[in-house]
């Protein structure tokens, strides 16, 4: 994959890329976030108050990190992803009670109002378009359901921004080429360009039917999490 695929080819090239990197995905994630990705996922699951009474959707579940954390809290969990190799890795890690299904975020194979919580980690910028996915999340969440999104971000302050750019745009692609897949880890920093600025993302969420949108930044802006409530 060149750094950013053409719009029409994006879904197919993103799916092929995740199928390729599935075996090294978890190891690379821990390495490039210095182990903080799991702390960010845990804090989002805690902020959403996930417990044994919840039915949780992990959208674009990848290898199942969010699914596992929600299951640990006793929730009924369903993970959906369109990359078969990522789902196979999730199947190997998650207990049998976690349901896993192959599906496209733009047309979820799930019933209206089936979930009380939906989470999605590091996936927004991989979708061909964000509003149709938010509309699907609003459809499958019941009224009052909670949404949590975790994504990359860029620090605003000058020095952290320089350090972050050095790590994310130089070191991460080099580590990726060495330990996993060069093109995939050149795409990773480049794909941040697909992310709308915070105010636009908030407007998209409100337009899709979410209220109480809250944004938190992690590690001075290296990552962000958003929570919202289905109206
Ligand atoms: C960066 S990984 C994130 C995996 C996991 N959520 C995490 O927190 O590590 C992005 C995932 O989104 C999935 N994905 C991208 N576009 C998708 C779509 N349209 N429908 C379903 N899954 C999609 C990819 O297959 C990949 O597993």
Image (cartoon, rainbow, N blue to C red):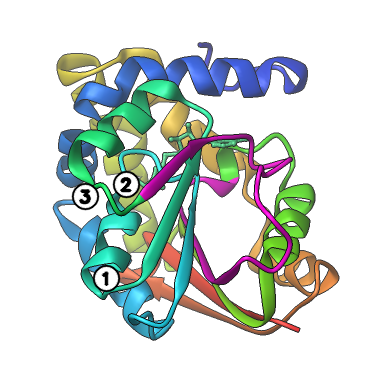
Res 64 label: 2
| Mark positioned earlier in the residue sequence (3 or 2) | 2
Whole-percent x, y for residue 45 in the image: 35, 74
Q: What span is in magenta?
A: 99-124
Residue 57 among those drawn in magenta: no
How packed is label 2: few (under 14 Cα within 10 Å), some, or many (20 or more)? many
Residues tagged 3 and 1 counted as in contact (Cβ below 8 A): no
* Horizontal side of residue 141 vs 48, given as left or right: right
The residue wearing badge 3 is 95
| Mark positioned earlier in the residue sequence (3 or 1) | 1
Q: Is residue 122 visible?
A: no
**Camera-side residue of 136 and 172:** 136
Of the 4 image quadrants, the one containing the C terminus is: bottom right
- Is the CB–ligand 1 distance for label 2 below 8 Å? yes
**Camera-side residue of 185 and 62:** 62
Residues tagged 1 and 2 counted as in contact (Cβ below 8 A): no
Residue at x 35%, y 14% (from the top left corner): 20
- Distance from label 3 to label 2 (Cα)? 10 Å
Residue 113 among those drawn in magenta: yes
Q: Can residue 225 be seen in this view?
A: yes
* Horizontal side of residue 38 vs 64, given as left or right: left
Helix, strand or loop at label 1? It is: helix
Q: Nearer the viewer, mark 3 or mark 1?
A: 3
Res 42 label: 1
Helix, strand or loop at label 3? It is: loop
Whole-percent x, y for residue 59 in the image: 52, 50
| Mark positioned earlier in the residue sequence (1 or 2) | 1
How packed is label 3: few (under 14 Cα within 10 Å), some, or many (20 or more)? few
* Horizontal side of residue 14 vs 129, given as left or right: left
Whole-percent x, y for residue 64 in the image: 32, 46
């Amino acid at each position: 994959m060149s750094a950013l695929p053409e719009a029409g080819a994006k879904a197919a090239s993103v799916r092929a890329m995740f199928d390729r990197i599935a075996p090294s995905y978890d190891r690379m994630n821990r390495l490039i976030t210095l182990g903080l990705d799991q702390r960010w996922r845990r804090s989002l699951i805690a902020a959403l108050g996930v417990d044994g009474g919840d039915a949780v959707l992990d959208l674009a579940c990848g290898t199942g990190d969010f699914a596992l954390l929600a299951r640990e809290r006793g929730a009924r969990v369903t993970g959906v992803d369109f990359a078969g190799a990522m789902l196979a890795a999730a199947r190997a890690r998650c207990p049998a009670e976690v349901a896993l299904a192959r599906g496209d975020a733009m047309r979820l194979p799930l019933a209206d109002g089936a979930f009380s919580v939906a989470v999605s980690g590091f996936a927004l910028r991989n979708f061909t378009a964000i509003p149709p996915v938010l509309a699907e999340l609003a459809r499958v969440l019941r009224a009052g359901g909670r949404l949590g999104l975790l994504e990359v971000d860029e620090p605003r302050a000058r020095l952290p921004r320089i350090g972050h750019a050095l790590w994310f745009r130089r070191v991460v692609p080099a580590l990726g080429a060495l330990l996993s897949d060069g093109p995939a880890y050149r795409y990773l920093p480049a794909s941040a360009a697909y992310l709308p600025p915070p105010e636009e993302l908030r407007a998209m969420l409100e337009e899709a039917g979410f209220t109480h949108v809250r944004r938190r930044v992690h590690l001075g802006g290296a990552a962000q999490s958003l929570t919202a409530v289905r109206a």
